[in-house]
Amino acid sequence: AFPLVEPSSPLPALDVFAFLPLRSYGMRFLLQADWVLPSSRESVDASSAWNQWLRSCVPDLFVEAAAALLQRAGDEQEKLRASNLLLQLVPTGASEFFEPLAKACCRRLKSVRFLLTRGGEFVTPGEAVVAGSSALAATAASSWSGPPVSSTAAPTLPVPSRHSHAAERERLPTHPRRR
């Protein structure tokens, strides 16, 4: 769950839930799932295939929640707030079992139009051009590992649907309590 207002200070790390709060893993959004837990109920069981599958679903759900957040934005100020909030929500501070989420969410965000242009439109990171000095633009271009940036808009990449895990659902591990 994402907060719906832009905070005046950095977002705090929030707990992961398995119906009840477990503990914080450094993410700035709420994450609730039917995690398999050890008897202490203090953490997520990292060795569980079920938990690994649940974690693999988070990046697609993150993108779906991001799309919903961006759709709520009306005027340019709201769009800017939503874009800034989304950047704060990327789980770069995730730890332990959830650490792989930072890279996975960033990979998925490459196809999402969430960066606000001067014209008030959202573009993907690959469509964005850095404004400013030519040295700054050259530095940005040299660090970009995607296709060459041109003055025309890049083709729109499809945003995954909520059913993008259909193939994975067929291979879904059985929850340990349901065997």
Image (tube, rainbow, N blue to C red):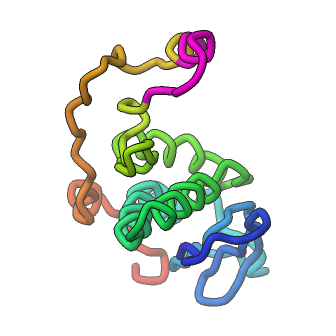
Task: Tell me where residue 69 sits by quadrant.
Answer: bottom left
Residue plotted at (43% across, 43% down): 117
Q: 172 or 12, which lies in front?
A: 12
**Residue 139 belongs to the span the image colors magenta:** yes
x, y percent for residue 63? 40, 57
x, y percent for residue 40? 78, 80
Q: Residue lying furthest bottom in this view?
A: 20
x, y percent for residue 177? 48, 82
Task: Tell me where residue 167 sits by quadrant.
Answer: bottom left
x, y percent for residue 126? 39, 30
Q: How many marks?
A: 0
Residue plotted at (67% across, 48% down): 92
Q: 92 or 69, which lies in front?
A: 69
**Residue 37 belongs to the span the image colors magenta:** no
Q: 19 or 148, which lies in front?
A: 148
- In the picture, the quarter occupied by the C terminus is bottom left
| 92 left or right of 176 in image | right
| 38 left or right of 144 in image | right
Q: Is residue 1 above or below residue 71?
A: below
| Residue 61 seen by the camera | no
| 128 left or right of 158 in image | right
Q: 7 or 163, which lies in front?
A: 7
Q: Is residue 176 above or below residue 52?
A: below
Residue plotted at (35% across, 68% down): 71
Q: Is residue 141 above or below residue 121?
A: above
Task: Tell me where residue 65 sits by quadrant.
Answer: bottom left
| 113 left or right of 17 in image | left
Q: Which residues are magenta?
A: 129-140
Q: Is residue 125 above or below residue 70?
A: above
| Residue 53 seen by the camera | yes
Residue plotted at (50% across, 44% down): 104
